[in-house]
Image (cartoon, grey):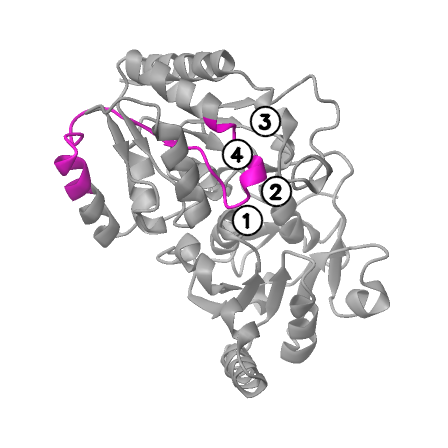
Amino acid sequence: MGSCVDKRVGLRYCDAMLPDAIDPAAVRRVLVIKLRHHGDVLLAAPVFRVLRALIPAVDVDALIYEDSLDMLRLNPDIAMIHTIDRRTRHEPLLRKVAAERRLLRALKGRHYDLIVHLTEHPRGAVLARLLKPRYAVARRYPGRRGRWWRKSFTHLYDVPARQRHTVETHLDALRRLGLMIPPGEKALRLVAGPEAWSTIDRRLAQAGLATRPFLVIHPTSRWLFKAWPTASTTALIDRLLAAGHALIVTSGPDEAEREVIRELLKPLAPSDTLVDWSGALTLKELAALLERARLFIGVDSAPMHMASAMGTPVVAVFGPSGDHEWAPWQVPARVLTASSYSCRPCGFAGCGDGQLSECMGAVGVDEVFEAITGLLEDTQTRACASS
């Protein structure tokens, strides 16, 4: 019993303990399917990284929604990205059929040996049947997909009842195949790219922040029930400015998010150290900005995961969503929750699905300010110790 080494690819795996472990030498091309939103797609990045580390000659492709493309675009671990435009669901039937045929033709042309399906989306099972790879792995969903789901894949895996981070749950798909995950290969990877860097450097220079440390605060989410109350955010910004910090406020381009930013900034006096870039940055530009930032402050959102991928320390307020599954990954962080609410994390869209989350309002301004101050001091201490 124990790990084995396949000398053909230098891969450690454990067929002694797992009779149906895959033959890594038979895997030359992999399709990873992650049909979710921005942050969820970014959290799948370690799967590509691990596959490339374990099987160096492999090509790993992705299938994602088109609007999440920037989460994986330029990632050197990915050979090709296939996308699905969700807007086609509103197109006439013939156009939708044509788009599906083009996608299927492109996927068949890649001749995949392995499909790694990371959600319960039925498209993954359909593609596993149509593309006929040698291996196909997905999570088991008892009582939800039945025999049709089970028969679509060669390997199925279960998720432990105890909550674990989403990155680890994704990597369980590879563990089920008999692959041993190298601990140093679990990091998120997000590449901003030279165009985004150039834009951000220019904007920082124009704002007078090219050489000055700054914090990024992203108070919103596309799901506004995850947002911290507007009044609390305003009070926090006021305290941070009074403490001498330069702040850049960001948000998504959605008008509802931008309106939240306008409301929370309205009571604040104009300041040279408070910059509003809400709705003004592309995802790649936001990634470049976050890598420049000294600290990210926000909620459970895609930008929080982007900050983690860029190696930026994070202070995040969590409410209805689970911090065990979605916390900042492998960066110095402080996660604040309302411990008095035993109902969280509930996973609802606000209390009673009413779009307002009481547990978010229960996290105080003093708590968040102290977490920011403490994390900044800790990171400064570590920086001095390592220099």
Observer able to see residue 57 = no
The question of residue 208 being in magenta is answered with yes
Position of residue 272 measured from the top left corner of the image (x, y, whole percent) = 19, 25
The one of 128 and 362 positioned closer to us in this rendering: 362
In which quadrant of the rendered view does residue 359 lie? top right
Asked whether residue 316 is drawn in magenta, I would say no
Q: Residues within 10 Å of mark 3 (few under 14, many from 20)?
A: many
| Amino acid residing under circle 4 | Ala
Q: Residues within 10 Å of mark 1 (few under 14, many from 20)?
A: some
Question: Which residue type does callout 2 highlight?
Answer: Thr
Q: From the image, state whether disc 1 or disc 2 is nearer to you.
A: 1
User: Mark 1–mark 2 contact, CB under 8 Å?
Assistant: yes
> Taking the image as drawn, is residue 2 in sight?
yes
Q: Residue at x 55, y 44 (%)?
A: 223
Alpha carbon separation for disc pair 4 and 1: 18 Å
Pick whichever, 81 or 279, lies toward us: 279
| Residue 205 place in picture, x, y as percent | 13, 36
Badge 1 amino acid: Asp
Q: CA distance from mark 4 to mark 3?
A: 7 Å
Magenta-drawn segment: 201-230
Residue depicted at 53% across the width and 36% down the height: 300
**Is residue 173 rendered to the left or right of residue 219?**
right
User: Which element is circle 3 on?
Assistant: helix
Asked if labels 3 and 2 touch by Cβ distance under 8 angstroms, the answer is no
Residue topped by disc 1? 40
Q: CA distance from mark 1 to mark 2?
A: 8 Å
Where does label 2 land, which residue? 166
As drawn, 273 above or below 135? above
Residue 227: numbered disc: 4
Mark sitting on residue 360 = 3
Mark 3 residue type: Met
Residue 282 location, x and y as percent?
A: 33, 51
